[in-house]
Image (spheres, rainbow, N blue to C red):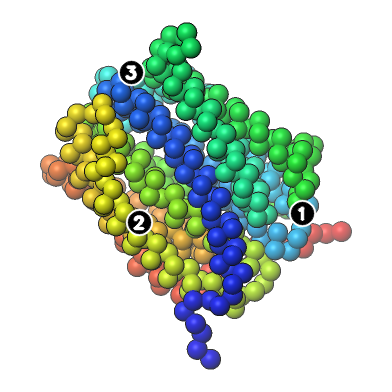
Amino acid sequence: MKRPLLTRDKSFYRSLIRLAIPVALQNLITFAVTFADNLMVSTLGDSAISGVYMGTQIQTFLQMFSAGIEGAILILAAQYWGRQDRESIRRIISIGIHFSIGFGALLTILCVCMPGSIIGIFTHEASVIRDGAVYLGIVCFSYLFFCMTQSLIAAMRSVEVANIGMIVSGISLVVNIGLNYILIFGKLGLPAMGIRGAAIATLISRIVETTVMFLYVFKKDRKLKMDLSDLLKTDPMLRRDFIRYGLPLIGGQVVWSINLMCNSAIMGRFDQYVIAAVSIANTMNSLAYVTMNGSASAVGIITGKTVGAGKIELMKEYARTTQILFLGLGLVTGLLVYLLRLPFISLYQGIAPETAEYAAQFCLVLSVTSVGTCYQAAGLFGLVKSGGDISFVFKNDAIFVFLVVLPSAVIAFLFGAPPWVVFACLKCDQILKCFVAVVKINRFNWMKNLTRDRMA
């Protein structure tokens, strides 16, 4: 019997839309917070925006590591959700939070002790190091709050509660933008704090979102009915599973965070105009990634639940449908990046003409690579990784980062290639991974049930 290219199961499309929209909106709101920071700081000049960009590289590293832990929570908990095993889900959440807080605390201590040395890894520009160290020395105190919030949001997503992440991010956006305006420019009788004000605003908004998330999970949620005492409980068997399946996820995120930091270090060898342009282009890239990431996360939740419930043939239908939908979404996203690149760059009022020119070149590169990003992100994370073949994605990322992306970019830089060529080398894997993804997905050997029967 010939199977349809697009599944006729209407519940797939309903679930995809129901889960994707809140996650995408949450990502959009999170992007808006960063974007507001960049726009307001850009009025202080290229050195300031470059300093904040370099200061956020450690936050990016934390986000990537935390995303590995969140991924382990999401994938394992979603499969147990397919079996309606709430007790195991509560234990998995507790284990994930323990790991996340431990790493967040370690990173905070390092950044408090040597912020200038850390920024110096990425650039030799003295003014950028100075401004970046000021920003990093304050914003690092938000890391613990960020870890707790994101782990709890992942926990709620695993049981198909996606709205709370969007609400929490919305509250954070309002708080952050309001405080940015007051503290950066000195309103309501307060002194103008510049970069320091942007960092303080971020810290306060992180505290607020953690408070809201705790109130929801431990007071309002009725799906898991968690108690604060659950955070102290663990399970040796589930901890072993979390480490076994979580390590490749965390390893993949660490590889990717190393890639991003090396990106910053390589592009940081150019002047401050290029650094500022990279910040602008990556902000637009984040905006383009909002919808595709939200949709890919929704596919991951559906995949985990379906595989956990043992519905393998149905999952094959979903996989074929996902590939077609996300290839189309990638083409639309690439076209929008191309058409909107110049209006987007014009929003940055305080930048130099050289910065605007470089940013336009980088955005042209992104208009091509975003097509591949959309397809392979949904395929490799939403299907392969969430379906249980976690180690494959880790190995694939490591091969591309260390054998293709970074070597090609370093060679291009050493041979004096223009900045946009080096930037393109750093993004080339987004297209190349698609060839691997299409083969792996359509072999359908990635569906693995990771759940266990709990002992009575």
Q: What residue is at 32 percent from the left and 31 percent from the top?
A: 122
Q: Is residue 77 above or below residue 96?
A: below
Instruction: Provide residue 369's location: percent of width, then percent of height.
Output: 30, 55
Q: Residues within 10 Å of mark 2 (few under 14, many from 20)?
A: many
**Mark 1 vs mark 2: which is more N-terminal?**
1
Q: Give, as a three-letter code, the residue at label 3.
A: Arg
> Mark 1 sits on what residue?
86
Q: Is residue 422 above or below residue 241?
A: above
> Mark 3 sits on what residue?
130
Q: Residue furthest front?
A: 188
**Nearer-the-camera pick, 197 or 187:** 187
The answer to whether any part of residue 61 appears in the image is no
Q: Residue furthest left?
A: 416
Q: What residue is at 42 percent from the left and 64 percent from the top?
A: 326
Q: Give, as a three-letter code, the residue at label 2.
A: Thr
**Mark 3 vs mark 2: which is more N-terminal?**
3
Q: Give, as a three-letter code, the residue at label 1.
A: Arg
The answer to whether any part of residue 34 appears in the image is yes
Q: Residues within 10 Å of mark 1 (few under 14, many from 20)?
A: some
Q: Is residue 330 above or below residue 185?
A: below
Q: What residue is at 46 percent from the left and 61 percent from the top?
A: 378
SS state under label 3: helix
Instruction: Provide residue 118's location: percent of width, then percent of height.
Output: 39, 26
> Mark 2 sits on what residue?
333
Q: Residue furthest right?
A: 456
SS state under label 2: helix
**Nearer-the-camera pick, 91 or 165:** 165
